[in-house]
Image (tube, helix red, strand yellow):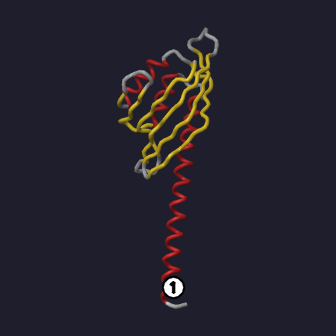
Amino acid sequence: MNYKNYVTLLVATSLLACHQESNNRVEADFSAIMGQLEDIEALMSSGLPITNLNEKYLEFFVDDLVLLPPGGSAVEGRDAALAFFNDVWGGVTLIAVNYETPVIMLEGDMAVRRYVGSGEFLIDAESEPVTGSGRYIDILQRQSDGGWRIVWHTWTQIDQ
């Protein structure tokens, strides 16, 4: 093999290896982002008391998160988000949550995840179960440990 063919083969092999590594990273990122949504779904359906559930849910977020609730002002930071969720969901008991049709868009260390969610819950101890659904968008950022956390979270109510 002459020198020129050897260099061409070496460059092509290097490019293929980089492309393969890049594809593997993208696949791992998609898998991690999807797995996080599955973990959130399991948490929301766990039957934990709402205060504990809200605290555990916020572990999926960065500390300086932003919530954009429908028809309301932005909620900024973990403490404000916890107070918001505790106020909104205070007496509610979640029975089951289901997230469907997720779409994930990835660009470097940022990602957008949109999905539809539905849930069944009790407004108070004497109520009949109520169902509701919404559309959600999360903006996520890769963390220094390689994991993903939610930076911005917004939703719209479809029905209740």
Query: Does residue 98 sit above or below 71 in this rendering?
Result: below
Residue, far right: 128
Query: Does residue 149 sit above or below 58 in this rendering?
Result: below
Residue pointed to by mark 1: 6
**On the picture, is 127 further left or further right than 151?**
right
Position in image of residue 15 (x %, y %): 50, 70
Amino acid type assigned to the residue bearing label 1 in the image: Tyr
Q: Quadrant of residue 74?
A: top left
Task: Quadrant for the N terminus, please.
Answer: bottom right
Name the residue rendered at 38%, 31% in the picture.
78
Name the residue rendered at 53%, 44% in the picture.
104
Query: Does residue 71 sit above or below 36 in this rendering?
Result: above
Residue, far bottom: 2
Position in image of residue 72 (x %, y %): 40, 21
Task: Quadrant for the C terminus, please.
Answer: top right
Foreground residue among 9 and 34: 9
Q: Quadrant of residue 128?
A: top right
Q: How many callouts does the rendering have?
A: 1
Q: Quadrant of residue 67?
A: top left
Position in image of residue 26 (x %, y %): 52, 54
Q: Residues within 10 Å of mark 1 (few under 14, many from 20)?
A: few
Position in image of residue 8 (x %, y %): 50, 81
Name the residue rendered at 47%, 37% in the picture.
138
- Name the element at disc 1: helix
